[in-house]
Image: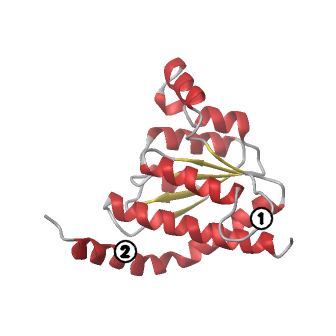
Amino acid sequence: MKTFLSVLAQHQVVLEQLANNSDEIEVAGALLISVLKQGGKILLCGNGGSAADCQHIAAEFVVRYEKKRKALAAIALTTDTSILTAAANDFDFDSIFSRQVEALGNANDCLIAISTSGRSGNVIAAVKAANNKGMAVIGLTGSEGSELSQLATMTIKVPSNITARIQEAHILIGHWWCAVVEDAFSREA
């Protein structure tokens, strides 16, 4: 059995290596600021723990992260059970996010697509739908090359193949995006 200290050591190694991705993370943060300043919105999709991250990040944008500022347009595509179950039932599970992107997405929006493997069929379908609408797509995934990394406008690949370590890095990145976006909008208030 792994000790807590061994898991903590894994986590620390991944976060130290994540520094090599700082340029991509910062470019993605600037893209999110630009999208929101131009009146666009942020859509987010992912499965399981990544779905929870979508909801968490969307809530930080809409409500607040640390500062009082205006509400920012963000929608977690993981939350409407009627849409999710109707799309899965009437079409297939791979359509649960793409149908929402088709209905809600516009060319001035950005999709944050989260998949630790980069191979989730419903996330890939959403990315394809976003590409068809001319939307920017930020992919968050693990270190392996994947279809997500090939289809996204930009991809942040967390340097790990361990799902838990990838997810820990994803929420850290999401929190940094929330902070930098919030700073940009709180200066305007």
Q: Where is residue 59 in the image (x, y as percent from the top left)?
A: 63, 54
Q: Position of residue 86 (x, y in %)?
A: 56, 22
Query: Is 162 situated above or below 83?
Result: below
Q: What element carries label 1?
A: helix
At label 2, the amino acid type is Val
- Residue at (70%, 57%) from the top-left corner? 63
Q: Which quarter of the image is occupied by the N terminus?
A: bottom left
Q: Where is residue 18 in the image (x, y as percent from the top left)?
A: 45, 76
Q: Is mark 2 on a helix, strand or loop?
A: helix
| Category of crowding for the residue at label 2, using alpha-carbon neighbours closer than 10 angstroms: few (below 14), some (14–19), many (at least 20) | some
Q: In this rendering, would 23 be left or right of 48?
A: right
Give the CA distance from mark 1 to mark 2: 29 Å
Residue that label 1 marks: 34
Which quarter of the picture shows residue 26?
Answer: bottom right
- Residue at (68%, 35%) from the top-left corner? 102
Q: Which quarter of the image is occupied by the C terminus?
A: bottom right
Spot the residue most to the right: 189
Mark 1 vs mark 2: which is more N-terminal?
A: 2
